[in-house]
């Protein structure tokens, strides 16, 4: 007999918690995931989504609070889907993520590191220098909404600022809403991509229709008032064009001072969102690879050279490989700008390598991996072709890291020397981590 769908408030104890801040309660023999709750709490909730094996619920009230619960800093926390852990102390957030990494390594990869690394920490607020903000002209509210989507509904959160965006982006949400609301194409602007460099802040406005002359004037005036670079994107990435200022005399860039490196990037390029953590992460990766003048380092999924360039300051030879040709172009330019002649880059689909490529077997004794969420399964199953003695793996998904770690340890003969989390995205469910492998 099918269970009745209950939409009235219910009260229960939270018996466990997931990595994304959803507590687990049991009611009528069915699991209920309640966002914003912690283990041991007694809460009242209402079910919002019904699944075959579990339901999802919205928290209404906390009757017995966990000692790890704190007051959320953001006025729209609980409604906005951008953050899921603001109600948890930063220390316990990291504990939850470390437990998630450990569980994944043990359950999926069947591996345990010899050493658990202390969490890599940095700023907990105003850290996010890259974001994609959704935009929607909502006539019922009389304004255009700009922000992240809601947690329990496919709507854009009605918000006026964001506590995790870096300054000055944190306080620009309301002003952006006013700008969009005054445009003739306000209903045809689905998103704004934001990027903060050390020398400028850029906004890339996605436009489905051509803006009028008055719209362009409004963009220009907004850029001048707030000291921003404004770009329009009317199609694919190759359609991104500056609107203000008239001429861009210097690319966006960030620096890695420890290595005397400057990394130039375009406003839609991928860069790590947390500048402080990125510097710590690069330092750790270079330190762990321990490359010297006689070492040859392979950096796979290299992007614009975030790891390749500092590694070239230490190693004899570095090769960066990336699937996106435009990023490789940027990496080559970055190497030249930094005066590095011992690092080269090439474009290759790393999901299709088979060992016949000449560069694969060129004797790499150090290797760095920084793949997308899908991981690097095709690479790690062929690690014997590369033959590195030491590997540093930077991951943005604990499940695929665990899968690939299992392959490296159980099939390729490596030892998992160390692993730990990187607190790249405080207050969110995102688990960034790093692992070090070695072969005697």
Image: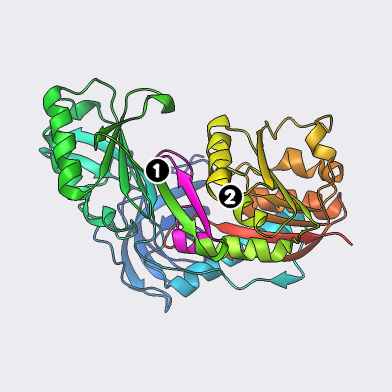
Q: Are marks 2 and 1 in contact (CB under 8 Å)?
A: no
Task: Judge the density around disc 2: few (<14), some (14-19), many (≥20) Cα neighbours within 10 Å.
Answer: few
Q: Position of residue 252 (x, y in %)?
A: 39, 46
Q: Give the number of callouts.
A: 2
The answer to whether any part of residue 115 appears in the image is yes
On screen, residue 185 versus residue 324, left or right, reads left
Q: Secondary structure at mark 2?
A: loop
The residue beneath circle 1 is: 251
Q: Secondary structure at mark 1?
A: loop
Is 6 situated left or right of 297 in this image?
left
Who's the residue at 27% across and 53% down the image? 169
User: Is residue 18 at all visible to an observer of this figure?
Assistant: no
Q: Closer to the observer: label 2 or label 1?
A: 2
Q: Name the residue that disc number 2 marks.
A: 339
Q: Which residues are magenta?
A: 260-278
Q: Nearer the viewer, residue 383 or 388?
A: 388
């Amino acid at each position: 007999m099918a269970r009745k769908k209950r939409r009235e408030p219910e009260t229960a104890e939270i018996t466990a918690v997931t990595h994304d801040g959803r507590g687990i309660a049991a009611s009528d023999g069915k699991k209920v995931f309640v966002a914003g709750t912690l283990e041991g709490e007694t809460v009242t909730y209402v079910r919002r989504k019904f699944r075959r094996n579990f339901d999802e619920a919205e928290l209404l009230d906390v009757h017995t609070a966990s000692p790890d619960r704190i007051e959320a800093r953001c006025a729209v926390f609980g409604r906005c889907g951008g953050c899921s852990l603001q109600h948890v102390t930063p220390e316990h957030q990291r504990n939850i993520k470390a437990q998630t990494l450990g569980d994944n390594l043990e359950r999926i990869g069947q591996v345990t590191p010899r050493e658990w690394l202390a969490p890599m920490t940095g700023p907990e607020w105003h850290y996010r220098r890259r974001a994609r903000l959704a935009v929607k002209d909502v006539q019922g509210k009389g304004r255009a909404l700009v922000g992240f989507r809601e947690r329990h509904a496919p709507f854009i959160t009605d918000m006026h600022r964001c506590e995790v965006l870096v300054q000055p982006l944190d306080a620009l949400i309301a002003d952006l809403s006013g700008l969009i609301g005054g445009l003739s194409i306000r209903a045809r602007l689905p998103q704004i991509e934001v990027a903060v460099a050390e020398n400028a802040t850029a906004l890339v406005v996605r436009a489905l229709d051509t803006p009028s002359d008055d719209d362009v004037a409004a963009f220009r005036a907004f850029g001048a008032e707030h000291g921003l670079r404004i770009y329009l994107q009317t199609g694919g990435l190759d359609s991104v064009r500056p609107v203000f200022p008239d001429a861009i005399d210097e690319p966006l860039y960030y620096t890695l001072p420890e290595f005397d490196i400057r990394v130039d990037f375009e406003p839609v390029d991928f860069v790590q969102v947390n500048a402080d953590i990125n510097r710590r992460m690069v330092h750790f990766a270079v330190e762990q690879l321990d490359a010297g003048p006689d070492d040859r380092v392979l950096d796979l999924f290299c992007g614009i050279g975030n790891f390749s360039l500092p590694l070239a300051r230490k190693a004899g030879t570095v090769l960066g490989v990336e699937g996106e040709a435009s990023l490789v172009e940027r990496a080559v330019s970055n190497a030249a700008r930094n005066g590095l002649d011992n690092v080269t880059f090439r474009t290759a689909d790393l999901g299709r390598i088979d060992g016949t490529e000449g560069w694969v077997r060129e004797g790499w004794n150090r290797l760095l991996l920084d793949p997308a969420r899908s991981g690097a399964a095709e690479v790690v199953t062929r690690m014997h072709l590369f033959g590195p003695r030491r590997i540093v793996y930077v991951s943005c998904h604990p499940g695929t890291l665990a899968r690939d770690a299992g392959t490296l340890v159980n099939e390729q003969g490596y030892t998992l020397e160390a692993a730990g989390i990187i607190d790249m995205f405080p207050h969110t469910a995102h688990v960034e981590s790093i692992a070090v492998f070695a072969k005697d």
